[in-house]
Amino acid sequence: MSDYSLLAQTSDYLIINKAPGVSVHRDQSDIGLLEQIRIDLDCGPLYLVHRLDKMTSGLLLLACNAEAASYLSRQFQERQVEKYYLALSDQKPRKKQGLIKGDMERARRGSWKLSTTTNNPAITRFYSTSVEPGLRLFLLKPLTGKTHQLRVALKSIGAAIVGDERYHGVSAEPIDRGYLHAWALAFDWQGERCEYLCDPDVGELYQRESVKQQLESWKPPGEQPWPTS
């Protein structure tokens, strides 16, 4: 399995589909992901304007020059970029849709937890639906960009993500990946709204017909009537 696939390329930015289990940083490999892409495409330096956790697959936006990096990074910082994620859980959530909001606090061994305070909260809107007995699909729209935000949000409502070794624990059966995927991304570029969507292509659970049918009903995610509370 390749570390990524190229979905779009302009003179100012790239869109890739990052594979699960691949770090956006150098990690343990001799060559980091950005350097590998640069070599493959024979292009200049690439700039990270946002991040995906190692276990998370899907859409990653990379800038091709410093000016584009500044422009795109500012959109992320000002919460002008729309991001939509997919997750699967084998646990029953305490609520099936709505808003998850709270401050992120450090826990043990590099983990995070959600508190009841809201001084500088992580905010996530979500839908969910049962696709099979014991398997629930979540459509997530983070309104902030905190470390481990979506993983901690689902953990906080009792529905940790399947395959998330940090927050889920051990599953009854072997799991082939962590089931969090960056599905859709929308941002402004030179006065135009750019929208990208990438279905998950890695993971046995994502390939089940019940999941694929639900994804079709959720397209395009930006037109969903999102719950506000």
Image (cartoon, rainbow, N blue to C red):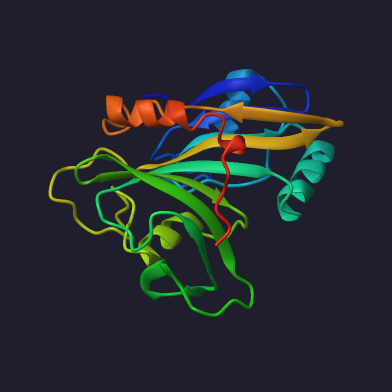
* Most foreground residue, 143 or 173: 143
Estimate the x, y position of residue 44 in percent, counting from the top left: 73, 28
* Most foreground residue, 172 or 47: 172
Q: Is residue 201 left or right of residue 136?
A: right
Q: Is residue 174 left or right of residue 13?
A: left
Quarter that holds the N terminus:
top left
Q: Quadrant of residue 186?
A: top right
Estimate the x, y position of residue 48 in percent, counting from the top left: 66, 43
Measuring 76% from the left and 31% from the top, which residue is drawn there? 193
* Most foreground residue, 32 or 98: 98
Quarter that holds the C terminus:
bottom right
Query: Could one spot residue 13 in this view of the protein?
Result: yes
Measuring 84% from the left and 39% from the top, which residue is drawn there? 67
Estimate the x, y position of residue 135 in percent, counting from the top left: 25, 44
Measuring 64% from the left and 73% from the top, which residue is drawn there? 120
Query: Could one spot residue 3 in this view of the protein?
Result: no
Measuring 73% from the left and 54% from the top, which residue is drawn there? 77
On screen, residue 211 above or below 118: above
Give the total of numbered labels: 0
* Most foreground residue, 78 or 217: 217
On screen, residue 83 above or below 65: below
Q: Is residue 6 left or right of residue 159?
A: right
On screen, residue 62 above or below 168: above
Estimate the x, y position of residue 13 in percent, counting from the top left: 72, 29
Q: Quadrant of residue 11?
A: top right
